[in-house]
Amino acid sequence: MIELKNIFKWVNQGGNRIFLLKDIDLTINEGEFVSIMGPSGSGKSTLLNLIGMLDGFDEGEYNFMGQSVKNLKEKQRSEIYKQNVGFVFQAYHLIDELTVYENIETPLLYKDFKSSERKAMVSDILDRFNFVGKKDLFPNQLSGGQQQLVGIARALISRPKLILADEPTGNLNSKQGEEIMELFTKLNADEGVTIVQVTHSEKNAAYGSRVIHLLDGRMENK
Amino acid sequence: MFKNYLKLAIRNLWKNKAFSAINIIGLSLGLAVCITILLFVQYERNFDGMHKKNIYRLDEVQSWEGMVQPQKVALSMYPMGPSLKNDFPEVKNYVRIFDFEKAGLEYKNKHVYLEKVFWTDSSFFNVFDYKLVKGNSRQVLTQPNSVVLTEESAEKLFGQEDPMGKSVSTYNMRDTIHFTVTGIMENVPENSHLQFNGLYSLSSIVNPNDTTDGGNRWGGNWLVTYLELADNSNTKNMETRFPKFLQKYMGPEIIKGYQLFLQPLNKVHNGSSDITHDYHNFRKFDESYTNIFFIIAFIVLIIACVNFINLSTARAARRSKEVGVRKSIGAHRFQLVFQFLGESILLAFIAMVIAIVLVFLFLPFVNNLSEHQLSLSFIRQPVLLLQLILGTTVVGIISGIYPAFYLSSFKPVKVLKGIISTGKNKSFGRNVLVIGQFASATFLIISTVFVVKQLSFMRNKDAGFNKEQIVMTTGAYKRYAELKIALEANTLVKGVTGSSQRMGNNFHQTGFNYKGAGPVKNLASSHVYVDSDFLSLYKIQLVAGKDFTKEGNGKEYIVNESLAKELLKETPKASFESLIGQRFWTNEDSMSTIVGVAKDFNFNSLHNKIETLALINQKDGGFHDISVKIDGARAKEAIDFISATYKSICVSAPYEYQFLDEHFENLYKSDAKVSKVVSLLAVIAIIIACLGLLGLASYSAETRVKEIGIRKVLGASVSNIVSLLSKDFLKLVLIANIIAWPLAWFLLGRWLENYAFRIDISIWVFAIAGFVSLLIALLAVSSQTFKAAVTNPVKNLRTE
């Protein structure tokens, strides 16, 4: 599904070239649950954003589901992204002005679903996450864990094949974190959703089927 | 989708109340100004819109020897209409109009006094679309001594009685004439440039076939001619054939002094500012003013739009997260652009609704100020309503397009990490816009000062004669001498004099002959018949010769300096003294001479240069205008006394009076109107610009909250912080001033060229305008910066 070959990414700062990612070779197959670990500034989030096509790279080759990302036009890239990827953020990033229901519904708006279809899909997921009673609340009326669940529900609503999670439990207490991890495991096992998560915690990383360690932009051998 | 955006937009507006309020107030003010100006322009352009035929007014350009400059006049000659109809296939019909004084009508001993009754041709109702209530439009004015009254006049004179066929007579004219009422017409609408209370048949006073009648000849310009042309007539082509036409009837030399041109009816009201002797042009308006209003309204609206642009981009940080999230869950950039545009359009519509309410509330005030009868009723017309909706959408797009593209350009990876690029580059664009706003506002302040100054200059300039405490009345004619003696007997009256025309009116021109050292010289000049004490009452100074004498009646002329120079054109070295005693006459048999040269005085409005003028000592037949100089300390008593005396001597004539200085005020009415409107718009522009500045200042204080906190911890005082935050804005206002000044200097210089007598452009006005704009900006900014400066720094730093 994801194939990275000799990926380099850098920024130029005052004549020096600072490498964010160095020579990354990584293949992730459909149905995998991969955890990326490493200290702060090791390039974990950069790699995740790159995989999610939110960020570019300077050298190397990236194939997403058999298509070379480098040669895609902006519009095609955004189309592939819309169809296949769901993002979950550490800070949840819900839209404060929208209710739970509306936040979850938003991705569907960008995919031109009909109003009735949207309604059915959102109700379905609200059911699954036990959020029916909270659907008219605004994000600031929810706890952190609940907000992250809404974030995940929003990522799942468009039935992505790949979920990218950037420290999804970073702002949560351990009990809430466990719930989220179990949810990911279940999604991975039951529905075959590919999951790539960035995490600091060994414990959370262990939920994954594979762990990748990054240090100073380079993949470490296990 | 749309519903979602709408919901979100409303929530956003509600959440950021200060931001929304600034934008909505600014935009509503701007839109209200635009709606009002549009109503105003529509009103002016629709003047005379009730007439459907292809009507033109025939005007002349006169450039006779002796005139300071050629003049366009709204007058024409009696035979021109019929001859044009005869000679030009394009001319389908003509109608002529004349009026010389207010009409006193009598019916069964009831006296009614009508402001204006026109003498006109029987074709009047065929050419114009005024509506007759009673009578046949083809016949009402065919017979001599017919009169058509408006419903209002008929009711005044007849009450409930049926006026048709009744006989009425005039009572204030030199001869009593009897008329038969042949028709009743609807009252003249307010937006007609011809305003009148009734119509007499012109054939009552002029017989086209009577060779002894001077009125029907070529040469005398005493009435206004309107022509109905066939559709699609080429008026330019007709105008090229006019010189031949004039030569045919008046000889080959005539074209040296005369030209004819056609003015479309819908331009008569708006496009006659350079036409003189234009007596029947109600609320004459200068079209160039509508353009000025348009431009100012546009500037005000743009200032309001700029507020939106500036505040939206300044607040970008707040919305950047939303942009990042939406993009990361699949929003395409254009979807975001539409979302943001939708918000600004929604805002524009809210502002439009408020604007309409504002216009509705303030229209009576505007009408009062501008003496118009504007109404919002046009909103009921679907086409105009559609234009309004379209216009509002455009305003929304103009103010929203840049913020929309700017906001939607954020890269999700960056904004979600909290790195937002609202650095120096972005504020540069904002600064340029603020400078533009304040440059416009400062420009308007400067313009207002100059417009007001020019106006007060015209009101207060020494016109070369004394117009204080002079009461004007009219209509005594042959009773003049008797009235003068009676009035002067009382100490309330300082003096009485008479003249054929009133100061401030454009005196009529006529031809004169002058015999100096050389051959006889023929030339044209304005002229006025006056009593022998006219110059002394008006304190007009003589530069040569002596004043009129009582004995010199009919034989003495005093010319003004302009005419004296004209007479001495061939002998420039000769002094004014050399003119004294030279023969000067209109008719060969009068043995009249020049006795004096008067210092030039502004007998006209100060829009015009001082024309050549001959004053004639001639009191036979009395005077139309009587000037009574009164004791200013007892004005009320004096007026009562004049009224009583007038009524006892001129029994049947209606008594009306006017102070001469009021009469002069009226000459500057349209200027006064413009200056009021411009001042009002300048104030609104400044308010809107300051609202924007207020918003930016509060934003800037907000984003620099941490910096302020650190500085305070390091020991900065409140005044340090306020000056730190205010400095940047004041710099912008200063730059705006530097841009506005030369622009104002240039444009106002050009505007002032319209006035023959004008003020100098003084530098201190610019300095004061600059100071005022700085002060206002400082007030707007400091309220915000002060608030930021006094906050406890610990509170702000703790959040980090």
Image (tube, helix red, strand yellow):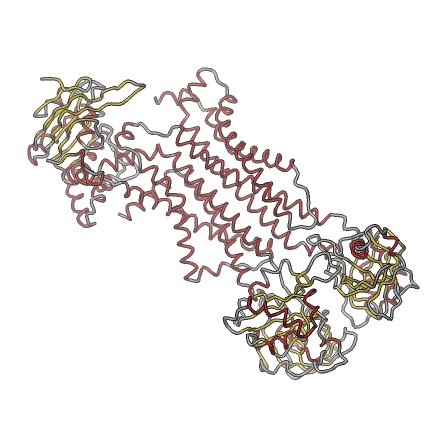
In the image, residue B354 above or below residue B70: above
In the image, residue A13 above or below residue B292: above
Closer to us: B341 or B216: B216
Find the residue positioned furthest to the right: B551
Indicate the quadrant where residue B708 lies: top left
Residue A15 in the figure: left or right of residue B202: left
Residue A51 seen: yes
Indicate the quadrant where residue B655 lies: bottom right
Residue B478 in the figure: left or right of residue B668: right
Residue A134 seen: no
In the image, residue B159 above or below residue B326: below
Residue B733: where, in percent of width, then height?
52, 33
Closer to us: B422 or B35: B422
Residue B692: where, in percent of width, then height?
47, 38
* Residue drawn at point x = 59 percent, y = 62 percent: B269
Residue B332: where, in percent of width, then height?
25, 41
Indicate the quadrant where residue B120 lies: bottom right
Residue B18 in the figure: left or right of residue A146: right
Say how many tags the image has.
0
Q: Quadrant of the C terminus of chain B?
A: top left
Residue B530: where, in percent of width, then height?
83, 62
* Residue drawn at point x = 75 percent, y = 64 percent: B509
